[in-house]
Amino acid sequence: MEPRILSRPAFTVAGLMHRGAVDGEKIAALWGQFGTRMGELQPVIEPDVTYGVMANYDEATGEFDYVAASQVSNADALPRGFVPVAFPASDWAFSRRPCPS
């Protein structure tokens, strides 16, 4: 699937974060936790759209932050354990991949 390039205004996502090295089991477990707690996150912009955000890579340790998230209109009062990630206006490569059932 070829990605499309989209220009997007600034936006914020919020979700649950894992800090560590690449570990598919822990990231899968994070998505499971996020799935059970998504209803706590309000207001969500598109309830059927989620984001996997990787940031803050440490080259020395191989650790990074991974956030399982949804886009929110306001991140001022997030539920306990949720973290916001703000993105500036920018061009993005976008592809829609269905979640495995």
Image (cartoon, grey):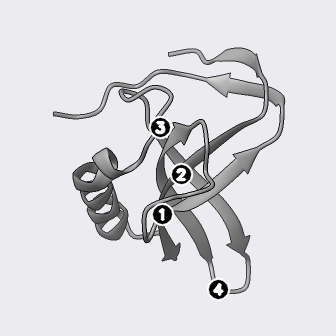
Label whose residue precedes the other's in the sequence (4 or 2): 2
At label 2, the amino acid type is Ala
Residue in the picture at 36% in, 27% down: 48
Identity of the amino acid at label 4?
Answer: Thr
10 Å crowding of disc 2: few (<14), some (14-19), many (20+): many
Q: Nearer the viewer, mark 4 or mark 3?
A: 3
Residue marked by disc 1: 82
Name the amino acid type tagged 3. Pro
**Left or right: where does residue 44 sit relative to residue 35?**
right
Q: Position of residue 21 (x, y in %)?
A: 51, 76
Near-viewer residue (89 or 54) = 89
How far, Cα to Cα, is label 4 from label 2? Answer: 25 Å
Q: Disc 4 marks which residue?
A: 61
The answer to whether mark 1 and mark 2 are in CB contact below 8 A is: yes
Q: In terms of image quadrants, where is residue 24?
A: bottom left
- The three-letter code of the residue at mark 1 reads Phe
**4 vs 1, front mark:** 1
Earlier residue among tags 1 and 2: 2
Disc 2 marks which residue? 14
| For residue 25, above or below residue 34 | below
Which SS class for mark 3?
A: loop
> Which of the labelled discs sits on residue 43, or is there none?
3
User: Percent x, y for residue 45?
Assistant: 51, 28
The answer for how far apart the CA atoms under marks 1 and 2 are is 6 Å
Q: Alpha-carbon distance for marks 4 and 3? A: 36 Å
Please state, as top left, top right, bottom left or bottom right, where the C terminus lies in the image. Answer: top left
Residue at left 41%, top 48%?
A: 41
Q: Earlier in the sequence, mark 4 or mark 3?
A: 3
Q: Is residue 92 left or right of residue 99?
A: right
